[in-house]
Image (cartoon, rainbow, N blue to C red):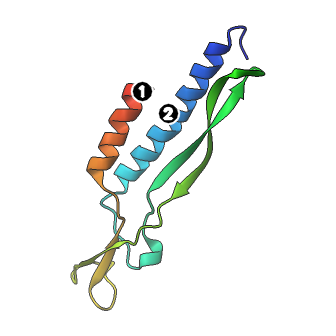
Amino acid sequence: MSNLPIFDVAGSAMTAQSVRLSTVASNLANADSVAGTPDAVYRAKQPVFSAEPVAGDPSLAGVQVTQVTESTAAPLKRYEPGHPLADAQGYVYAPDVDPVAQMVDMISTVSTG
C-alpha cells in the first residue's frame, strides 16, 4: 500500500486487466483446437471483476478479480471423418470461441488498461 491511494487503485486495475488479457490469450490460443468428445473441449474463460475499497477510504475503489469462469456454451460439432480425433460417427468438437469478439476484448483491455 502506497502513501498515495490512487496508485493502489491504478495498480489493482492493471492487475485485473492483466488477468483479462491472459484469458483472452488463452481463448485465442485454443479457438481452433478440437476434441473427440464434447466433454474434452476447451471452454472459453472469462474473468469476473468486483469493486474493492482501497486504503480504508470508502470514496476510492479498486478492482479485484473474484473468479475466472468457464463458458457453458455447447461445443461446435463438425463432421470430419478423416480426423484422428473423430468419434465413431466422424465428428470432432470445437470450442465456441469467437476470435473476433476475443480480439475486441483484447483491444478494449489494452486501451483501458
Identified at 47% across, 61% down, the residue is 71
Q: Name the secondary structure under disc 2.
A: helix
Residue 60 or residue 13, whichever sits in front: 60
Q: Is residue 37 above or below residue 20?
A: below
Residue 63 or residue 59, whichever sits in front: 59
Identified at 35% across, 64% down, the residue is 96
Residue under numbered circle 2: 17
Q: Is residue 58 above or below residue 95?
A: above
Give yes or no for contact between labels 2 and 1 (Cβ–Cβ under 8 Å): yes
What whole-number distance in Å separates the C-alpha atoms at marks 2 and 1? 8 Å
Displayed quadrant of residue 31: bottom left
Residue under numbered circle 1: 112
Q: Name the secondary structure under disc 1.
A: helix
**Label 1 neighbour load within 10 Å: few <14, some 14-19, many 20+:** few
The amino acid beneath tag 2 is: Gln
**Label 2 neighbour load within 10 Å: few <14, some 14-19, many 20+:** many
Task: Give x and y (percent) for residue 16.
Answer: 55, 34
Residue 52 or residue 101, whichever sits in front: 52
Residue 102 left/right relative to 54: left
Q: Is residue 95 above or below residue 47?
A: below
The amino acid beneath tag 1 is: Thr
Residue 99 left/right relative to 44: left
Residue 51 or residue 94, whichever sits in front: 51
Residue 39 left/right relative to 34: right
Q: Give the mark nearer the N terminus: 2 vs 1.
A: 2
Task: Give x and y (percent) for residue 86.
Answer: 31, 81
Residue 55 left/right relative to 30: right
Identified at 56% across, 46% down, the residue is 48
